[in-house]
Amino acid sequence: MGMRVSTKRAIKRVIAIALLFLGGYYLLTAAGIIQSIVVFFGYYPDNKTLALIGIGIIVIALLLDDIWRAKIKNAFS
């Protein structure tokens, strides 16, 4: 049973790190540091919308990982 919990935790951490990279990419693209165009199913978001999406993805990534979620919870308590 201990192996299952650690495997779940590892998978969640990998997903959280991937989401952090994706959110960072969107923020850098919105800031104009990375010259790229992001398309969501035919929708081209402007820089403000892309920055908000990037911040949202980063927040989700931080809350997905158990360690980071505990650190955020402790910071606000």
Image (cartoon, rainbow, N blue to C red):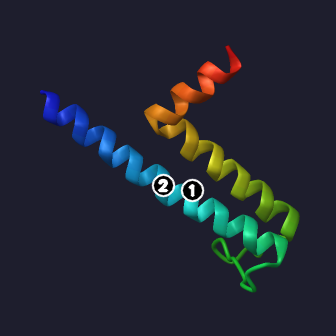
Across and down, in percent, residue 39 comes to: 68, 77
Task: Kindly give the residue lying farthest to the top in the view shown.
Answer: 77
The one of 1 and 40 positioned closer to us in this rendering = 1
Q: Quadrant of the C terminus?
A: top right
Place of residue 63 in the rendered image (x, y in percent of width and height, measured from the top left): 55, 36
Considering depth in this image, is 45 or 72 the residue closer to the camera? 72
The answer to which image quadrant residue 76 occupies is: top right
**Which disc, if any, is residue 56?**
none
Residue 21, by quadrant, is bottom right
Tally of numbered tags: 2
Q: What kind of residue is marked 1? A: Leu
Q: Residues within 10 Å of mark 2 (few under 14, many from 20)?
A: some
Give the side of residue 64 with respect to residue 10, left or right: right
At x 69%, y 48%, the residue is 56
Q: Is residue 58 above or below residue 51?
A: above
* Structural distance between the alpha carbons of marks 1 and 2: 5 Å
Image height of 40 relative to 59, above or below: below
Residue found at x 32% / y 48%: 11
- Which secondary structure lies at badge 1? helix
Q: Secondary structure at mark 2?
A: helix
**In the figure, 25 relative to 12: above or below?**
below
- The residue drawn where x is 66% and y is 23% is 75
**Residue at left offset 78%, top offset 78%:** 33
Residue labelled with disc 1: 20
Circle 1: is it few (<14), some (14-19), or many (20+) Cα within 10 Å?
Answer: many
Name the image quarter holding residue 48: bottom right
Residue identified by numbered label 2: 17
Q: Quadrant of the N terminus?
A: top left
Is 53 positioned to the left or the right of 73 in the image? right
Q: Tell whether label 2 touches label 1 (CB within 8 Å).
A: yes
The three-letter amino acid code for the residue at tag 2 is: Ile
